[in-house]
Image: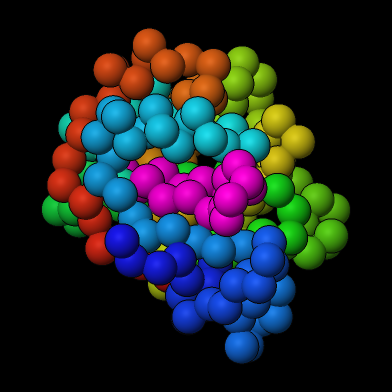
Amino acid sequence: MTSPVCVRCGGPVAVVGDEWTCGTHGRIEPLHQPLPAEHHHLWDVASSSAVPVWVPVPPPSGWTASGVRRTGGTGPARGVALSLQGPGVTTRVAELVIVSEEPGVGLGAAYAGIDGTDPGPEITSLPRDTSLHVGGQRAPLWSLPVSDRSAYVGEAAGCWLWVVAWPVTEWMVIHDSLTLLDLRENRERVAEVPVGALTPRLAI
Ligand SMILES: [Zn+2]
């Protein structure tokens, strides 16, 4: 089995007791290798996660789940990413990564392509840019200043919610009628999510 890597840079990590460290980032959450989004892998992640495992139900038309990745050493995951792939409006294949994490982890920032682990406090002083139906509520999302992808962040169920789309022109897949369910509480709904091949997009 391949060793975990640093959640912030994908570099090698050292472990002493319960602490994982990266030579560049110091103490970090270890990040496990991506897994195909087969339903048993999704269930395994959902059963060992301290944060919501957000799954779009239904997914955008023609889209499939293309991988899942979790952080965590011996304890429950503090960060989970699900990727999806499908026909874009401007491109043949578009991709989406949805991250749920506790503050300070940095998995969402890594996929969004921004420095640090959390969005800055200035985010919420601006009007929201879009919103999603998340866990039965409407979660406002703010766009982040990145140029090679479309990245949004907000808060849902007490955790950061990051939604990142590639290429940058595919931002419209992140829209008001997209509905996310927490797989931990909706395991029977996972069967409604079609599964595709593992994407390289989940590399950090
Ligand atoms: Zn690192």
Residue at 52% x, 46% y is: 80
Look at the image and say whether residue 73 sits in the magenta stretch: yes
Give above or below for 204 relative to 64. Answer: below
Where is residue 75? Give x, y as percent.
62, 46
Residue 107 or residue 49, whichever sits in front? 49
The residue lying toward the viewer, choosing from 8 and 32, is 32
Residue 195 placement: quadrant:
top left
Q: Nearer the viewer, residue 84 or 184?
A: 184
Q: Residue furthest bottom?
A: 23
Asked if one can make out residue 66 in the rendered structure from this viewpoint, the answer is: no
For the record, the magenta segment spans 68-85
* Picture residue at 47% right of the left edge, 71% below the top: 5
* Location of residue 190 with respect to 153 vertically, above or below: above
Q: Position of residue 113 (x, y in %)?
A: 52, 71
**Which quadrant is home to the N terminus?**
bottom left
Asked whether residue 55 is drawn in magenta, I would say no
- Is residue 5 at least partly visible in the picture? yes
Residue 106 in percent (x, y) is at 63, 63
